[in-house]
Amino acid sequence: MGLTPLDIHNKEFTRGFRGYDEDEVNEFLDQVIKDYEIVIRRKKELEREVEQLNERVGHFNNIETTLNKSILVAQETAEDVKTNAEKEAKLIVKEAEKNADRIINEALSTSRRLSVEVEEMKKQAKVFKMRLRMLVEAQIDMIDNDDWDQLLDTQFPHGEPVQPEEEEQKEAEKEYAEK
């Protein structure tokens, strides 16, 4: 550092032949010393203030750096989440498509099976109807058979047809009605 207030205070001037007025010079030097001390104090205050401001700037720079890193990490995380969500969505869609295909295939298979079963039931109904018709026709043929007429016209040796008693006839009709 250059000149200090103490240097100014201790400065001795050589005296020349009609030199400066010593009191005036001393007064001026005292004023310079006071002003110089004020300037030095102010300079020290400003240096402290600059140091504090530099510390704060450093602190804010650290915060800014941290925030920038945090923003980058958040952006990367957001991208990762988005990418993972898209992948998961694609997987869900593929799985849903597979399930839909499976359900459709099962429905088609069931439909075909039921169609075959319906056709089989139709065939069985036709066969049943044909057998029933044949049975009924056979029964009608049996009723229409001449053997009944011969049976009813049969005469016993005494010459008179056998007539069941009224009660037996009623029981026979009752049994027939129950069947």
Image (spheres, grey):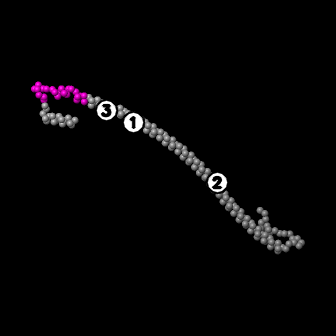
Residue tagged by mark 3?
A: 129
| Foreground residue among 58 and 40 | 58
Q: Quadrant of residue 118?
A: top left
Residue tagged by mark 2?
A: 65
The amino acid at mark 2 is: Thr
Rendered image: mark on residue 168: none
- The reply to whether the magenta stretch includes residue 21 is no
The amino acid at mark 3 is: Lys
Q: Is residue 163 left or right of residue 109?
A: left
Q: Earlier in the sequence, mark 1 or mark 3?
A: 1
Query: Does residue 100 sit above or below 56 in this rendering?
Result: above
Query: Does residue 37 sit above or below 166 in this rendering?
Result: below
Q: Quadrant of residue 7?
A: bottom right
- Residue 23 is situated, as x and y percent measured from the top left of the image, at 82, 74
Q: Quadrant of the N terminus?
A: bottom right
- How far separated are the C-alphas under marks 3 and 2? 93 Å
Q: Is residue 171 left or right of residue 76?
A: left
Magenta part of the chain: 139-162
The amino acid at mark 1 is: Leu
Residue tagged by mark 1?
A: 114
The crowd level at tag 2 (other Cα within 10 Å; few <14, some 14-19, many 20+) is: few
- Residue 176 is situated, as x and y percent measured from the top left of the image, at 20, 35
